[in-house]
Amino acid sequence: MAPQHASVRTLILTGKQVRKLLGMKEVLGAVEDAFRHKGLGKAQMPPKMYLFYEKYDGDLRTMPSYVEDMDVSAVKIVNVHPQNAKNYGMRTVMAVLVLINPHTGQPLAFMDATHITDMRTGGASAVASKYLARPNPKVLGIIGAGNQARTQMLALITQFGHFDEVRVYDLYPEKTKALIREFRRKYKEQVGKFKGVSSAKDATTESDILVTATSSRAPIVMDEWVRAGTHINCIGADAPGKQEMDPKILKRARLVIDDWEQASHSGEINVPLSKGLLTEEDVNAEIGEIVAGLKPGRENDDQITVFCSTGLAIQDCLTAKIVYDLAVQQKVGRSMQIVL
């Protein structure tokens, strides 16, 4: 007689449910933990695998990970299609994630990971800024007024509490104006002044922290605009051929990446590396090494620092575990037998 198998149930969580469960303070903790584990070599995380849909100007990435001493494992599938908003009224980035039980391989949860992706990407900038920006930054500049700008703002205000001024620039002035209106409603108690500016230069020149979150394939921030002491979070370059920075900035900055394999292939450094304008020796550290205390972060107030973020699967993994634990605790979601 064949043995009876235990019922394998999987918790299904929608995007709305994930959004209600997940707060930025918890995300900052998860992202910092992820960086630390990476720095200490306590995570399995192969580089992202890409499929390119060139005729549709899009791509798909798979991102597996396992944080060994926390026994948390996940696989995320995420797309980037920059023309979606204009052509279809859809998001540029969409994602799903399967949370795995490492003991048995059981799919514990299947969840929308679009909001997780937004939140942990913002969280990565905030954690990097904690170690690389000057203390008490006053002016925040944001280039790119898409969805990521919102979670960058949320993460940085959660990390630092207050800014005297926030400047926003986007190629489309109506997007800049709409985002400024939204920020005024949400953060009027935490920000002295919001300013929509008409150029990337205006967003850069006075900023203590600058965030670039665009899909650009050519530099949009020039070296001569960046003053001493600025910290820059480069978010947009996440596929081969993308770049947002004048390579001269990277040459003179303390340059920090999240992962060499990913960054050299698809991060902010990928284009200058391929052209011979930058070498591996120009990269000073991975952010995980800094968070783990193995290498220094900012060394003086005049130093320019740059964090190149490609997004780590372990960030998604640990953030998804928070969502799952809260969902179980609060009895949110639907448990189903998907696997026979």
Image (cartoon, rainbow, N blue to C red):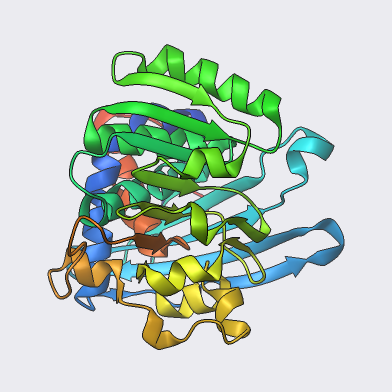
Task: Say whether residue 75 is left or right of residue 51.
Answer: left
Residue nearest the viewer, comparing 313 with 134: 134
Is residue 146 visible from the viewing direction of this image? yes
Q: Point out the image quarter for the N terminus.
A: bottom left
Residue drawn at x 45%, y 60% as measured from the top left: 311
Task: Say whether residue 20 is left or right of residue 85.
Answer: left
Q: Residue furthest front?
A: 224
Residue 113: percent from left, percent from top: 49, 46
Q: Quadrant of residue 297?
A: bottom left
Residue drawn at x 57%, y 30% as measured from the top left: 197
Residue 201: percent from left, percent from top: 56, 44
Q: Is residue 111 above or below residue 50?
A: above
Residue 284: percent from left, percent from top: 31, 77
Task: Say whether residue 160 is left or right of residue 203.
Answer: left
Count of numbered circles on the image: 0
Q: Residue furthest right?
A: 55
Is residue 10 visible from the viewing direction of this image? no
Q: Is residue 268 above or below residue 26?
A: below
Q: Quadrant of residue 332?
A: top left
Residue drawn at x 58%, y 87% as measured from the top left: 276
Residue nearest the viewer, comparing 283 with 258: 283
Q: Quadrant of residue 140?
A: top left
Residue nearest the viewer, comparing 37 with 285: 285
Residue nearest the viewer, comparing 88 with 220: 220
Residue 302: percent from left, percent from top: 25, 58
Q: Is residue 265 above or below residue 217?
A: below
